[in-house]
């Protein structure tokens, strides 16, 4: 039986979403389960990070609305770098409205997110209509959606029943929803991708209730597949050297999990 402890390549066969399949394969071939959260406010800095750290990562996570000098050229350049270094673009938009509204937010406005982001995320709070709205736009572009099941911040309101309901909702759209933002794997089903933010090499917190766990704990104890790292890398003196450390740590933990079976 294929479980979460099998390799990414084996799990790829069980994905109903073509994008999820591609992502597992990319991780397997590139040997990285590191996503960089590039939370910077300048377009040039974002492009620099994407080019320099691109070879180390499977995904570049953006908050496009914090860029103070945004122009559409930025997202075109990001797409070029995603192709050059083979990583996916994940716009951390955290949609949270009714289907009709998120449709507009996803495809239009200033950012035209659906035109360049391989993956976006959404809260399950409004109910299945939010997924239907995003799927209307994203399916035909071969995009994927991640549902926020469990956040990393202290005192969040996503309790066990909310998390389970999020999983049930995802199951109805398994060709479009690729997995979850979560601190723990939600299901034994091998096709869901579990992405975990709130990762640093040392546990701790920040002054605004962010909580950190280590790559080893996230992957070996909590069933995470992709570690999302922001300040642990970008605030370092040498972000490239630090990214290599997180990459190695994430990949070794994954190999150990596969070995243990
Ligand atoms: O529960 C969550 C979900 C997300 S997507 N907790 C998070 O921290 N995030 C995002 O991950 C957050 O918006 C930020 O972009 C990143 C974590 O950044 P770091 O600097 O704390 O590693």
Image (cartoon, rainbow, N blue to C red):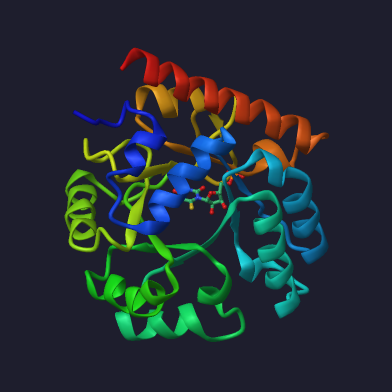
Residue 210 visible from this viewpoint: no
Quarter of the image with the N terminus is top left
Estimate the x, y position of residue 238 in percent, counting from the top left.
82, 34
Estimate the x, y position of residue 47 in percent, counting from the top left.
77, 59
Estimate the x, y position of residue 75 in percent, counting from the top left.
68, 71
- Which residue does the image show at 78% across and 46% down from the upper left? 52
Q: Is residue 78 left or right of residue 146?
A: right
* In-front residue for pair 116/24: 24
Quarter of the image with the C terminus is top left
Q: Is residue 182 left or right of residue 115?
A: left
Estimate the x, y position of residue 229 in percent, counting from the top left.
59, 40
Residue 87 visible from this viewpoint: yes
* In-front residue for pair 62/11: 11
**Vertical comparison of 153 with 145: above or below:** above
- Which residue does the image show at 66% across and 36% down from the upper left? 232
Numbered marks: total? 0
**Vertical comparison of 22 with 189: above or below:** below
Where residue 81 sits, quadrant-wise, is: bottom right
Where residue 173 sits, quadrant-wise, is: bottom left
- Which residue does the image show at 32% across and 51% down from the upper left? 149
- Which residue does the image show at 36% across and 43% down from the upper left? 12
């Amino acid at each position: 039986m294929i479980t979460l402890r099998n390799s990414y390549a084996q799990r790829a066969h069980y994905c109903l979403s073509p994008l999820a399949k591609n992502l597992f394969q990319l991780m397997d071939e590139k040997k990285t389960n590191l996503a960089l959260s590039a939370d910077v406010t300048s377009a040039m800095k974002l492009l620099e990070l994407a080019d320099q750290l691109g070879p180390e990562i499977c995904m570049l996570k953006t908050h496009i609305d914090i860029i103070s000098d945004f122009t559409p050229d930025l997202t075109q350049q990001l797409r070029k770098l995603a192709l050059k270094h083979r990583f996916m673009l994940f716009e951390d938009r955290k949609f949270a409205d009714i289907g009709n509204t998120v449709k507009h937010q996803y495809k239009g406005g200033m950012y035209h997110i659906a035109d360049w982001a391989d993956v976006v995320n959404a809260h399950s709070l409004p109910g299945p209509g939010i997924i239907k709205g995003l799927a209307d736009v994203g399916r035909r572009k071969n995009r994927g959606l991640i549902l926020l099941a469990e956040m990393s911040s202290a005192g969040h309101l996503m309790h066990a029943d909310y998390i389970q309901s999020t999983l049930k909702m995802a199951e109805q759209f398994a060709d479009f929803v690729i997995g979850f933002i979560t601190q723990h794997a939600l299901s034994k089903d091998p096709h869901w991708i579990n992405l975990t933010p709130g990762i640093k090499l040392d546990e701790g917190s920040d002054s605004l209730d962010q909580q950190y766990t280590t790559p080893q704990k996230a992957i070996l104890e909590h069933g995470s597949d992709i570690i999302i790292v922001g300040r642990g890398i970008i605030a370092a003196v040498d972000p490239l050297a630090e990214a290599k450390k997180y990459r190695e740590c994430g990949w070794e933990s994954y190999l150990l999990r596969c070995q243990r079976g």
